[in-house]
Amino acid sequence: NMKADLIFDNVKVYDVEKADVLLGQTFTVELSETSGDVRWFSDKDKVLIVDETEDGMRAVVQATAKGVSEIQLQVAGRLVMKLDISVYDQIAVSLNPTSGSPELK
């Protein structure tokens, strides 16, 4: 099965199918375990700009607008993988830190 890794400036995340990305981020998608030439398709051009390499094994992706985009990866006209990328412009709710009650000293 094809695998997709996301690479940011200081982070590499392995075997991803879904990600939330901050507006303005640029990252690389790197594929492994593929069989044949991979073609990339994105359903929301304004949300992501996808610039794949000639061999289809990597793409540089820019998050250019808020929203959700699906990247489809096809080999020989057959869908082999989907990546769901959500682009947000504020801190994601699931990333909000929480703290206990304040203590008087």
Image: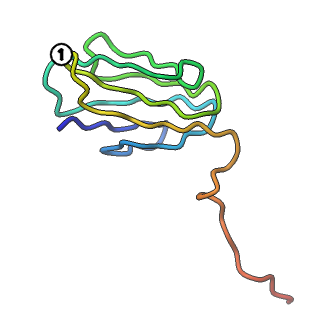
Residue 36 placement (x, y as % from top left):
15, 19
- In the picture shown, does residue 91 fall above or below 33? below
Vertical order, 54 against 62 (above or below): above
Label 1's element?
loop
- Asked if residue 89 lies left or right of residue 77, the reply is right
Q: Name the kind of residue labelled 1 in the image.
A: Ala
- When the figure is inspected, residue 45 is found, relative to residue 68, above or below; the finding is above
Q: Which residue is mark 1?
A: 76
Residue drawn at 86 percent across, 88 percent down: 104
59 above or below 8?
Answer: above
Q: Residue at x 22, y 33 (%)?
A: 32
Crowding at mark 1 (Cα within 10 Å: few <14, some 14-19, many 20+) = few
Quadrant housing the N terminus: top left
Question: Residue at 42% of width from left, 43% of height from top?
Answer: 18
Residue 23 lies in quadrant: top right
Question: Please, which residue is most extreme toward the bottom here?
Answer: 105
